Amino acid sequence: MALSLYLSPRMADALVWLGRYQQRLETMGKETLLQFDAIIDRVPEAGKVLFAKLGSQLDYRCATEFLHEACYGQHSASLLSLSAQARENAIVIRDLLSDSLFGSVNSVYHALKAQENNASLDAYQLAQLLTEIEYFWGRISTRLVKNRAAQFILFGQSLEMIDLKLRLYGEVDTLFEDAHQLNLYGDQLSDNWQHFEPLNQNQSQNMNTLQASMNHIIRYDR
Protein backbone atom coordinates (compact mmCIF):
# COMPACT_ATOMS: atom_id res chain seq x y z
CA MET A 1 0.00 0.00 0.00
CA ALA A 2 1.26 3.46 -0.86
CA LEU A 3 2.30 5.85 1.89
CA SER A 4 -0.32 8.33 3.06
CA LEU A 5 0.29 11.62 1.26
CA TYR A 6 -0.04 15.08 2.81
CA LEU A 7 2.70 17.03 1.05
CA SER A 8 1.82 19.88 -1.26
CA PRO A 9 2.82 19.47 -4.93
CA ARG A 10 5.50 22.15 -4.43
CA MET A 11 7.12 20.28 -1.55
CA ALA A 12 6.88 16.90 -3.28
CA ASP A 13 8.50 18.44 -6.36
CA ALA A 14 11.30 19.95 -4.26
CA LEU A 15 11.99 16.61 -2.57
CA VAL A 16 12.24 14.80 -5.91
CA TRP A 17 14.51 17.47 -7.36
CA LEU A 18 16.70 17.49 -4.27
CA GLY A 19 17.30 13.78 -4.90
CA ARG A 20 17.88 14.40 -8.60
CA TYR A 21 20.32 17.28 -8.18
CA GLN A 22 22.28 15.52 -5.44
CA GLN A 23 22.68 12.48 -7.70
CA ARG A 24 23.55 14.62 -10.73
CA LEU A 25 26.13 16.53 -8.69
CA GLU A 26 27.72 13.32 -7.44
CA THR A 27 27.78 11.67 -10.87
CA MET A 28 29.09 14.71 -12.72
CA GLY A 29 31.67 15.29 -9.99
CA LYS A 30 33.02 11.77 -10.35
CA GLU A 31 32.95 12.01 -14.14
CA THR A 32 34.76 15.35 -13.97
CA LEU A 33 37.59 13.71 -12.01
CA LEU A 34 37.79 10.87 -14.55
CA GLN A 35 37.94 13.28 -17.49
CA PHE A 36 40.46 15.48 -15.66
CA ASP A 37 42.79 12.46 -15.57
CA ALA A 38 42.01 11.66 -19.21
CA ILE A 39 42.96 15.18 -20.29
CA ILE A 40 46.24 14.90 -18.41
CA ASP A 41 46.79 11.60 -20.23
CA ARG A 42 46.48 13.44 -23.58
CA VAL A 43 42.80 13.02 -24.42
CA PRO A 44 42.11 16.77 -24.62
CA GLU A 45 38.53 16.53 -25.86
CA ALA A 46 37.36 14.20 -23.08
CA GLY A 47 35.83 16.94 -20.93
CA LYS A 48 34.09 18.58 -23.88
CA VAL A 49 32.51 15.29 -24.90
CA LEU A 50 31.23 14.66 -21.38
CA PHE A 51 29.54 18.01 -20.84
CA ALA A 52 28.18 18.20 -24.39
CA LYS A 53 25.97 15.24 -23.46
CA LEU A 54 24.22 17.53 -20.97
CA GLY A 55 24.01 20.38 -23.46
CA SER A 56 26.98 22.39 -22.14
CA GLN A 57 29.85 23.56 -24.33
CA LEU A 58 33.16 23.90 -22.51
CA ASP A 59 36.22 25.83 -23.64
CA TYR A 60 39.56 25.03 -22.00
CA ARG A 61 43.22 24.60 -22.90
CA CYS A 62 44.44 22.21 -20.21
CA ALA A 63 43.23 19.93 -17.43
CA THR A 64 43.34 22.69 -14.81
CA GLU A 65 41.16 24.97 -16.95
CA PHE A 66 38.78 22.07 -17.58
CA LEU A 67 38.39 21.50 -13.84
CA HIS A 68 37.54 25.15 -13.29
CA GLU A 69 35.08 25.21 -16.21
CA ALA A 70 33.42 22.02 -14.98
CA CYS A 71 33.00 23.49 -11.52
CA TYR A 72 32.33 27.16 -12.26
CA GLY A 73 31.68 27.66 -15.97
CA GLN A 74 28.67 29.69 -17.07
CA HIS A 75 26.56 26.68 -18.02
CA SER A 76 23.73 24.74 -16.42
CA ALA A 77 25.79 21.60 -15.77
CA SER A 78 28.53 23.29 -13.72
CA LEU A 79 29.02 21.67 -10.34
CA LEU A 80 28.37 24.95 -8.55
CA SER A 81 25.10 25.38 -10.44
CA LEU A 82 24.01 21.83 -9.60
CA SER A 83 24.91 22.33 -5.94
CA ALA A 84 23.00 25.63 -5.86
CA GLN A 85 19.92 23.92 -7.31
CA ALA A 86 20.14 21.14 -4.71
CA ARG A 87 20.43 23.76 -1.96
CA GLU A 88 17.46 25.78 -3.22
CA ASN A 89 15.25 22.71 -3.14
CA ALA A 90 16.56 21.77 0.30
CA ILE A 91 15.55 25.23 1.55
CA VAL A 92 12.00 24.71 0.29
CA ILE A 93 11.63 21.52 2.35
CA ARG A 94 13.92 22.55 5.22
CA ASP A 95 11.38 21.51 7.88
CA LEU A 96 11.36 17.94 6.54
CA LEU A 97 15.14 17.53 6.76
CA SER A 98 17.31 16.86 9.76
CA ASP A 99 20.01 19.39 10.57
CA SER A 100 22.67 16.95 9.39
CA LEU A 101 21.03 16.38 6.02
CA PHE A 102 20.43 20.07 5.35
CA GLY A 103 23.92 20.88 6.62
CA SER A 104 25.42 18.35 4.22
CA VAL A 105 23.77 19.98 1.20
CA ASN A 106 24.60 23.47 2.45
CA SER A 107 28.25 22.72 3.24
CA VAL A 108 28.99 21.39 -0.26
CA TYR A 109 27.50 24.51 -1.84
CA HIS A 110 29.46 26.89 0.39
CA ALA A 111 32.70 24.93 -0.08
CA LEU A 112 32.34 25.20 -3.85
CA LYS A 113 31.27 28.83 -3.70
CA ALA A 114 34.25 29.79 -1.54
CA GLN A 115 36.67 28.69 -4.27
CA GLU A 116 34.82 30.27 -7.19
CA ASN A 117 36.92 33.39 -7.67
CA ASN A 118 40.43 32.23 -6.84
CA ALA A 119 40.48 29.11 -9.05
CA SER A 120 42.24 27.17 -6.30
CA LEU A 121 39.93 24.16 -6.15
CA ASP A 122 41.94 21.08 -7.08
CA ALA A 123 41.01 17.49 -7.88
CA TYR A 124 41.71 16.31 -4.34
CA GLN A 125 39.39 18.92 -2.83
CA LEU A 126 36.65 17.97 -5.29
CA ALA A 127 37.03 14.32 -4.36
CA GLN A 128 36.64 15.28 -0.69
CA LEU A 129 33.44 17.16 -1.45
CA LEU A 130 32.02 14.10 -3.16
CA THR A 131 32.43 12.11 0.06
CA GLU A 132 30.08 14.63 1.70
CA ILE A 133 27.39 13.73 -0.86
CA GLU A 134 27.93 10.06 -0.09
CA TYR A 135 27.41 10.99 3.55
CA PHE A 136 24.09 12.59 2.59
CA TRP A 137 22.83 9.35 1.03
CA GLY A 138 24.08 7.33 3.95
CA ARG A 139 22.12 9.46 6.41
CA ILE A 140 18.75 9.16 4.65
CA SER A 141 16.71 7.20 7.20
CA THR A 142 13.51 7.45 9.21
CA ARG A 143 15.57 8.74 12.12
CA LEU A 144 16.82 11.74 10.20
CA VAL A 145 14.11 12.61 7.70
CA LYS A 146 10.39 11.92 7.75
CA ASN A 147 9.86 8.60 5.99
CA ARG A 148 7.52 9.83 3.25
CA ALA A 149 9.90 12.67 2.44
CA ALA A 150 12.78 10.19 2.26
CA GLN A 151 10.87 8.12 -0.31
CA PHE A 152 10.42 11.17 -2.53
CA ILE A 153 14.14 12.00 -2.29
CA LEU A 154 15.16 8.43 -3.10
CA PHE A 155 12.66 8.31 -5.94
CA GLY A 156 14.36 11.41 -7.37
CA GLN A 157 17.79 9.83 -6.96
CA SER A 158 16.67 6.67 -8.76
CA LEU A 159 15.04 8.69 -11.54
CA GLU A 160 18.21 10.71 -12.06
CA MET A 161 20.45 7.66 -12.16
CA ILE A 162 18.43 6.28 -15.08
CA ASP A 163 18.33 9.69 -16.78
CA LEU A 164 22.12 10.08 -16.55
CA LYS A 165 22.86 6.57 -17.76
CA LEU A 166 20.79 7.33 -20.84
CA ARG A 167 22.35 10.75 -21.44
CA LEU A 168 25.98 10.00 -20.61
CA TYR A 169 26.38 6.41 -21.65
CA GLY A 170 23.41 5.60 -23.87
CA GLU A 171 22.81 2.49 -21.80
CA VAL A 172 19.52 0.64 -21.87
CA ASP A 173 20.55 -2.97 -21.31
CA THR A 174 21.95 -2.09 -17.86
CA LEU A 175 18.88 -0.17 -16.69
CA PHE A 176 16.71 -3.04 -15.53
CA GLU A 177 18.00 -3.07 -11.95
CA ASP A 178 17.67 0.71 -11.79
CA ALA A 179 14.14 0.46 -13.17
CA HIS A 180 13.32 -2.15 -10.52
CA GLN A 181 14.46 0.24 -7.78
CA LEU A 182 12.51 3.14 -9.30
CA ASN A 183 9.38 1.01 -9.43
CA LEU A 184 9.77 0.02 -5.78
CA TYR A 185 9.74 3.68 -4.78
CA GLY A 186 6.91 4.42 -7.19
CA ASP A 187 4.79 1.68 -5.64
CA GLN A 188 5.45 3.13 -2.19
CA LEU A 189 4.35 6.60 -3.27
CA SER A 190 1.32 5.75 -5.38
CA ASP A 191 -1.19 2.90 -5.49
CA ASN A 192 -1.65 3.78 -9.17
CA TRP A 193 2.03 3.77 -10.11
CA GLN A 194 2.64 2.62 -13.69
CA HIS A 195 5.88 0.66 -13.82
CA PHE A 196 8.75 2.07 -15.86
CA GLU A 197 10.21 -0.46 -18.29
CA PRO A 198 13.28 0.42 -20.40
CA LEU A 199 12.31 0.46 -24.08
CA ASN A 200 14.97 -1.30 -26.23
CA GLN A 201 17.50 1.28 -27.48
CA ASN A 202 15.14 4.23 -28.00
CA GLN A 203 16.66 6.91 -25.79
CA SER A 204 14.05 9.54 -26.66
CA GLN A 205 11.15 7.28 -25.71
CA ASN A 206 12.85 6.28 -22.47
CA MET A 207 13.45 9.92 -21.55
CA ASN A 208 9.81 10.81 -22.25
CA THR A 209 8.62 7.88 -20.14
CA LEU A 210 10.86 8.98 -17.27
CA GLN A 211 9.40 12.49 -17.36
CA ALA A 212 5.89 11.07 -17.36
CA SER A 213 6.83 8.95 -14.34
CA MET A 214 7.85 12.00 -12.34
CA ASN A 215 4.76 13.95 -13.41
CA HIS A 216 2.54 11.08 -12.33
CA ILE A 217 3.99 11.01 -8.83
CA ILE A 218 3.68 14.77 -8.34
CA ARG A 219 0.11 14.90 -9.72
CA TYR A 220 -0.89 12.10 -7.38
CA ASP A 221 0.14 14.22 -4.44
CA ARG A 222 -2.27 17.04 -5.28
Image (cartoon, grey):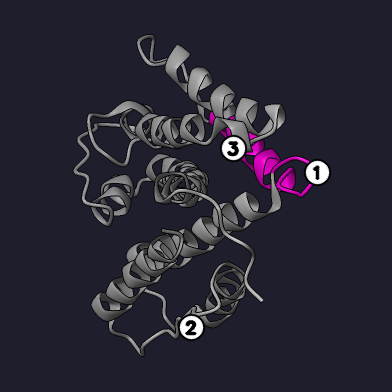
* Residue 166 in sight in this render: no
The residues bearing labels 2 and 3 have C-alpha atoms spaced at a distance of 31 Å
Q: Residue at x 34, y 49 (%)?
A: 43
Give the amino acid type for the residue marked by disc 1 in the picture. Answer: Arg
Indicate left or right for 174 with 53 as reference. Answer: right
Residue 136 highlighted magenta (yes or no)? yes
Q: Residue at x 43, y 40 (%)?
A: 36
**Can you identify the residue that label 1 sits on?**
143
Q: Give the mark nearest the N terminus, 1 or 2.
A: 1
Give the amino acid type for the residue marked by disc 3 in the picture. Answer: Leu
Give the amino acid type for the residue marked by disc 2 in the picture. Answer: His
Determine the image quadrant of residue 139: top right
**Can you identify the residue that label 2 sits on?**
195
| Mark linked to residue 130 | 3
Which secondary structure dominates the residues rendered in magenta? Answer: helix
Tell whether label 3 touches label 1 (CB within 8 Å).
Answer: no
Tell me where the magenta segment starts and ends, as one range: 126-145
